[in-house]
Amino acid sequence: MVQTWDGKANTFPSRLEKSNKYNDIFQKTAQGLPGDSNNVFVQLGLYWQLHLAYDSAEAPADFYNRFFKAWKAGTYTEGAQSYADRVALTAAGVAERNLSDFFTRWGMTLSESTLTKLASYPAESRAVWYLNDQSRRDRLAGQAAGEGSFTITAAMAPESENQVNVTMTASLTQGKLLGYEIRRGGKAVAFVFPGEDGSAVYTDTIGSANHRTYIYQAVAYDTLGNQIGQPVSSGEIRIAYDKTLDPASYTVSRTGDSVTFTLTEATDVSGLKLTEIPAAGDYTITVTTQDGKTYTARSGNFGQGNQAVDTAGSYLTYFQKPGAGAEDTRIWTYCAASVTVTGIPETLESSKLLLVSYAGDDIAFLEDGAAGLLSADYRYGEEEADVIPAGTLVVVGTYRGDPRFCTVKILGQFTRTTAEGEELEPVERPLDGYALLFAEVPEDGAVSDISDGLFLFVPDVQREAELQDQSHCDGVNLLPSRIKAVLSRTDSASDASSQRVTAETLWINSPGGTELPTIVLEG
């Protein structure tokens, strides 16, 4: 207050503005994580924003004058136990506004009784947690609320495997733009300030997530704390890359057509990736483990067996279990001290050879037909009911993972309309039905992560008809307007409590009508 004293309305810059703390303050309130900030000046923003929101020009210190009188007298806090409850009850009582969102954004955990009391006050229409010194100046100057239109796009960052550039542009017809709240999957992750032209770019680092899909949203706010219009959404984007070792973790040496990777320390390695596809030619990969033993991890030909799906123009092969035949598609991970590859053309630069650390789960729809009708009865088990009848509608695709610990679900996006034909927001939910995961079972019976599994999902057409409230349906095609395949993994083959999503496809339009592909299962 002393720093902002100007002899009038207290509009001089505060220490928060001078030290550029509002960026950190807005990141804290955008994410809304529980608990106080460890930075005392960031936490100071919680209290200062109440002054910015409610003090007038004529009485620039009035809010906290009334707040502390009520605090000392316990005017609003009878029965409240925690400090957070007492602060929230007192602030809301003095402001005569429901400030539950404000305190939740600041990480405070309020009791049910406090939330009920706060809900009895009139709603606060502004995002008070996004106010800064300029917000109060603009409010006192009579600045108009913001109006305008916005766009958002999301794309993979250049030269990056797990970063997304989210770009916003704005066209305001009135008011002043403060910035954008960025949401990923409906959850706020950051706040970004725009440039002079109203545009902004936020780079989101996904971390270790892979083969997952995301939709970004931007919510624009003016300097008064008002939301401008509705959130705008990007298209769906899929993060998919081959997880390779950092080249700094090994050294590379060459002798003729032989390339050797020597690891700084023993590291799990499960494959080899070439960012340029050589002409057809035989190759052999041997791995020396940390105990000094050497194994042939893979042999093949660059003209065949390319398992690269995430990066066009690259060649990828996964390691095999020692002694496994060429047809064995299990992915084997070695704790490697060194890896040697023979058959590499001398013209291929060493920097274009990379070691794959972990294959990771993946899932995709069959390109030739994601859904179709079974050509004939198919028996998949010994029980009497373990038969899929001919003509059954099935959804088909491929997966990479361990079938003992993985499961497949099909999400549906169902369109809805009113009795008058007006389209409503679509509903997303899993389709009712069951999934079968097929895998090559090797002679030793040791099924593990495989690179080319097949999944078959069988919708329960009768149950779907009930869920969709369809009184008459011929059962030929009862798919939603769009579908997405989701692969989940558990830590135990017999316990689903640890289930988490490890891969998913983009949404695709469901095939419609009666002219569906014929699905033939052999073997």
Image (tube, rainbow, N blue to C red):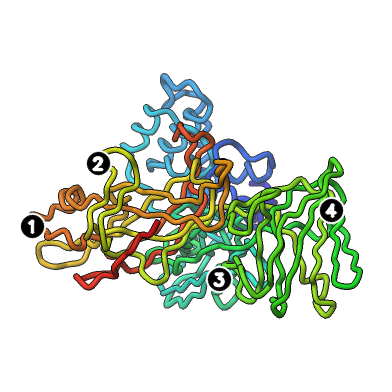
Instruction: Answer with mark 4 or mark 1, whichever residue precedes in sequence.
Output: 4
- Residue 261, horizontal then vertical, whole percent: 84, 59
Residue type (three-letter) at the residue carrying disc 2: Ala
Instruction: Answer with mark 3 or mark 1, whichever residue precedes in sequence.
Output: 3
* Residue at 87%, 55% in the rendered image: 262
Query: Which residue in the structure is indicated by mark 3?
Result: 155
- How far apart marks 3 and 1 lie (CA) works out to 43 Å
From the viewer's perspective, is the residue at label 2 or at label 4 nearer? Answer: 2
- Residue 291, horizontal then vertical, whole percent: 84, 40
Q: Nearer the viewer, residue 475 or 87?
A: 475
Query: Which residue in the structure is indicated by mark 2?
Result: 385
Q: Are marks 4 and 1 in contact (CB under 8 Å)?
A: no
- How far apart marks 3 and 4 lie (CA) works out to 36 Å
- Residue 161, horizontal then vertical, whole percent: 65, 64
Q: Quadrant of the C terminus?
A: bottom left
Residue type (three-letter) at the residue carrying disc 4: Ser
Q: Is residue 266 left or right of residue 45?
A: right
Label 2: which secondary element? loop
- How far apart marks 2 and 1 lie (CA) works out to 25 Å
Query: Which residue in the structure is indicated by mark 1?
Result: 472
* Residue at 44%, 69% in the rendered image: 235
